[in-house]
């Protein structure tokens, strides 16, 4: 079984950033891939970061940490459809 986790090296010890599903004493094989990117935040940490933003700039920076777009969602079309469904906008025929 292969599992990818994020970890940080501190004080000579490689420490997992999140929970690891291992049993006590279980042997593992470790392959390291270094990264200059900051670790991904948990959903709760990301939500808190966005909610606690006090300026637009802080909010904008926090939203950059969101997962990338799935590529299939058109926000403008979704807003247009919402306006049609609510009766706010009637498209020309």
Image: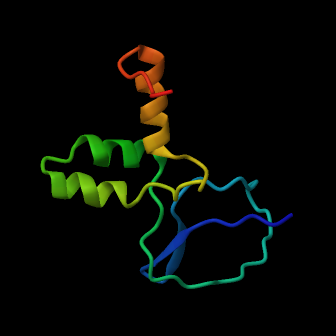
Q: Which residue, as the protein is rendered here, is positioned at the far top?
A: 87
Residue at the image position 32 percent from the left and 42 percent from the top: 48
Q: Which residue, as the protein is rendered here, is positioned at the far right?
A: 1
Residue 55 is situated, as x and y percent measured from the top left of the image, at 13, 51
Say left or right for 34 vs 32: left
Q: In this figure, what is the number of numbered marks? A: 0
Residue at the image position 45 percent from the left and 76 percent from the top: 37
Closer-to-camera residue (74/9): 74
| Image quadrant assignment for residue 14 | bottom right
| Relative height, residue 26 to residue 72 (above, below) | below
Q: Which residue, as the protein is rendered here, is positioned at the far front?
A: 93
Quarter of the figure that contains the N terminus: bottom right
Residue 74 is situated, as x and y percent measured from the top left of the image, at 51, 46
Say left or right for 18 vs 10: right
| Relative height, residue 76 to residue 66 (above, below) | above
Closer-to-camera residue (82/22): 82
Residue at the image position 35 percent from the left and 54 percent from the top: 63
| Relative height, residue 5 to residue 19 (above, below) | below
Say left or right for 69 vs 41: right
Closer-to-camera residue (55/20): 55
Residue 27 is situated, as x and y percent measured from the top left of the image, at 80, 69
Residue at the image position 62 percent from the left and 84 percent from the top: 33
Residue 62 is situated, as x and y percent measured from the top left of the image, at 31, 56
Q: What colour scheme does the image use?
A: rainbow
């Amino acid at each position: 079984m292969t599992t990818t986790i994020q970890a940080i090296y501190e004080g000579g010890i490689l420490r997992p950033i999140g929970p690891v599903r291992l049993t006590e004493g279980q042997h593992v094989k470790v392959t390291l891939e270094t990264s200059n990117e900051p670790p991904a935040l948990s959903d709760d940490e990301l939500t808190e970061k966005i909610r606690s933003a006090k300026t637009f700039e802080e909010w904008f920076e926090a939203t950059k940490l969101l997962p990338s777009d799935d590529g299939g969602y058109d926000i403008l079309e979704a807003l247009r459809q919402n306006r049609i469904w609510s009766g706010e906008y009637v498209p020309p025929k």
